[in-house]
Image (cartoon, rainbow, N blue to C red):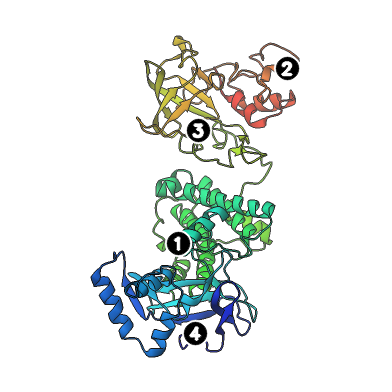
Amino acid sequence: MSSLADKGMITLREVPGKGEGLIATRKILKGTRILSEEPIIRIPEDTPDSPALRASIRRQVDELTSDQRRAFLAMCNIYPGDAASQYLGIIRTNALPIASGSGIFLAACRINHACDNNAQKGWNEGIKRHTVHALRDIDKGEEITITYVGVLNNRRTRQEALRKKFKFTCSCRLCSLPPHLSAESDRRLDEILELDGRIGRDGLTGILSDPKRILRYVDRQVRLYNEQGPDDTGLPRAFFDAAQITAAHGDLARARVFTERAAAGWLVLGGDDSLRVLKTKQLARNPSSHDTYGNSVAWKTAADDVPLGLDSNEFEDWLWKREKKNEPEQPGVFRNQATFPSFFQLPDETDVDDDFFESRDGVNYRPRRHWCFLAEIVDFVPLFRLQMKIKDVTGQTIPLFFYTDRRGSEIAPSQICKGYTIAVLYAQQHAFAFSEPGIRHEDPTLVKVCLLFLSGRLSCGTFLTYLVTPTPDIPTVARQFDGVERPSPEILDGNKWHENMPRVRQAGYTFEEVCEVLAVLVL
């Protein structure tokens, strides 16, 4: 075990049910480099089994010392075969990734798996060695463990991957949780993966088009990581994503803090000579060198503009740009983008976005709040079903197809005019097989067309009528005005928006966001 970073730190010992494994001979502190070793055998990347590969492996084994060869042949082999296949079977069972392929390491390849691993493996390109670092404090006598699969996968997926590739069933602490705790862990892991997809789905376009929403996703991801367990290996990546988002909008203060957190996390995983750690520390010193910097100045701050005197909760609220609850709305009809999202800000039909939907049983979902998509009718074609080309508040043009029972004929022909505005409650993005992404609309009670110009000041109308048909979940304003069939123009004058909102609230309306939708959509 001459490859140990600190001799006497660990030893090879029999582990019940696992064969041999590495055991700590003393307390190992978080961030300690446990191993640093060179491979004794190298295999090129994506090389299929062939006589040439076997000859290369045989030559490398022949060059090993007798002790190295003995240790290599003692490694587990889950691919039994003839003597000629023995070397390849050991390598397929134990090899760890390196820069351009995989390698066999006398010590690191002896480390057993746990989904809640206490150590992190990785190839350090700077020193051309495989390193293993303690993710947390490891007690004397505790087994050193790494993960063989993506720990973000839920229990079922992890177990299937381990059985398929390594022929064993994991019984680590995470896989042995009671059913209710295991289900909760899986829910967190599934949500983290789902958020990861949303964060990266639209790349820089998403960061520039809707930065607050993407930053909220990362904020949620970090909270889930912390719920799953302290110092999760995914945290540095999340912090770096947040740094990229804030740097893209000129916010160097937040970018610096997020980058420092990413560097600190990766330091634990890879050590201070890791190329990623060195690069991230340099970015923290000069956050304007982020690749995304310079695209926008919407959040512009200097690197030193970090507030002082805040407690930890207040600092996190500032850092993540969390909106204060019950903060009064700024004047202006479309300032609340949560209520009036652009097409890009709409939830995707294939995702369960917890910013838009909620569930009590984890199976059935309903809107968590109310939102209304507004767009100008650019063109329309009343073919087999009504289809429109519409333009949202950002100027993006998208298709809208009506999949209602009457295929869109519920809308009077006199209302289908170019330049008119269409309002759709609870709209979602839909990926059509025959068209660019757009909206597939199915419920005629949640759509209205009105003479309203998005490019103007919304002053052309003089009063409000219904936006939606009354339902148990969405009462209309009419039900709140002492049984009056329709609200009077004086109360909801489209030119008196600032007066409308208080009056509607005073009338006892319960859903504030729908109030706002109704109060500004003049027909």
User: Marks 1 and 4, how far apart in space?
Assistant: 30 Å
| Mark whose residue sits in front, 4 or 2 | 4
Q: CA distance from mark 3 to mark 4?
A: 54 Å
Of the 4 image quadrants, the one containing the C terminus is top right
Q: Are marks 2 and 1 in contact (CB under 8 Å)?
A: no
Q: Residue at x 73, y 17 (%)?
A: 481
On the image, the x and y values in percent for residue 422 come to: 48, 22
In three-dimensional space, the C-alpha distance between marks 1 and 3, rounded to whole angstroms, equals 39 Å
Of labels 2 and 3, earlier in sequence is 3
Asked if marks 1 and 3 touch (Cβ < 8 Å), the reply is no
Residue that numbered label 3 is attached to: 428
Q: Whole-percent x and y of residue 252? A: 49, 59
Tell me the residue that label 1 is attached to: 165
Q: Nearer the viewer, mark 1 or mark 3?
A: 1
* Circle 2: element type: loop
Q: Secondary structure at mark 4?
A: loop
- Distance, label 4 to label 2, CA atoms, is 77 Å
Distance in Å between CA atoms under marks 2 and 1: 66 Å
- Dot in front, 2 or 1: 1
Residue that badge 4 annotates: 5
